Image (cartoon, rainbow, N blue to C red):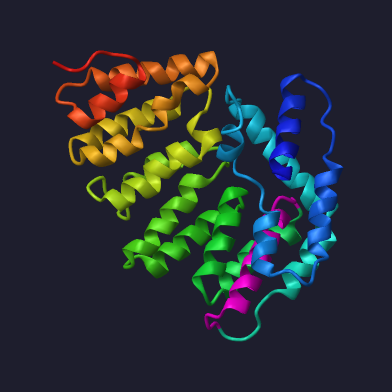
Amino acid sequence: QLATRALLSVVNAIQINEPIQAPVIYKDAVGALLQDDATDQALLAEMMTLPSERTVADQMDVVDVDAIHEARRFLRGYLAESLKDAWLAHYQHNAVKQPYSYNQKDAAKRLFKNTCLVYLTALTSQEIQALSEQQFQQADNMTDSMAALSAAVSQGNPNAQAMLQAFFDQWQHEPLVLDKWLIVQACSAHFGTLEKVRKLCEHPAFSMKNPNKVRSLLGVFAKDNLSQFHVSSGEGYSFIADKVLEVDALNPSVASRVVEPLVQWRRFDVGRQALMKAQLIRILNHPNLSGGTYEIVSKSINVKEKN
């Protein structure tokens, strides 16, 4: 709640074009958590994790996509810079030295360490950015490997593509692991994610006939990647509408899930509302649309039931 209030205060400053006041109270609270050596590290990690953009959006009557994205980026960078030494010290201290074996203590240390990594990679120095690459190369468990990969992808690390390829080469015969690989890329708030998702639709790891793959790539992109799905041009909307129609012919129940972010059109600004509604009408007018998808879309724009 404290983090959400801090984010909303920054959003408000951005919206009214006023200087952003650094949320010192929240920074001090996080700093205190970093000095807490009595509380379970897994709990501390959860407490220090910023709310997602979608969580912040849920607190707004009219979702301001751009302000939310800028506010979260600002707050993460502010915490990273202000508490840099503490993040780095804890990252290094919580590296598990012994060979991997699952136990609660080590799992908590990994979660805490990887939370530190998320903040550290908001900084731009080459030394800090190299941490995710080093962790990825040295990881002997999926948690550390995925955390490093996600950090590199989300920050646009120049070597992220090579890391993605290395991960794919290692796990290409494990479908459930590749779902995680797709999710990491679909979630990235880095500019160019939409084009990346387009290309992934043609990748051997993806299939429109596989519900898990559709949910991992298209579902996650539309539902959880607020800034990239809702780009002001409307390209994200038209792309997802195309894919809804494509998957509707194969699996209507999956299509009805993928279209859900579009039917929330009333929660956005006037410009995005018009763009989203136009794609919903296009879906609705498509011949042979399944009854389930038709019902969801028609209700969202107050169209009478299909004859």
Task: Specify whether 299 is left or right of 225.
Answer: left
| Image-quadrant location for residue 246 | top left
The secondary structure that dominates the magenta segment is helix
Q: Is residue 200 above or below residue 5?
A: below
Q: Quadrant of the C terminus?
A: top left
The x and y percentages for residue 13 are 77, 26
The x and y percentages for residue 28 are 85, 51
Task: Specify whether 208 is left or right of 42.
Answer: left
Task: Specify whether 203 is left or right of 286.
Answer: right
Q: Quadrant of the N terminus?
A: top right
Q: Residue at x 38, y 49 (%)?
A: 216
Q: Residue at x 79, y 71 (%)?
A: 37
Q: Which of 195/303 is in front? A: 303
Residue 106 lies in magenta, yes or no?
Answer: yes
The x and y percentages for residue 169 are 40, 66
Q: Residue at x 57, y 68 (%)?
A: 144
Q: Which residues are magenta?
A: 100-124
Q: Which of 288/263 is in front? A: 263
The x and y percentages for residue 72 are 68, 39
Q: Residue at x 38, y 39 (%)?
A: 198
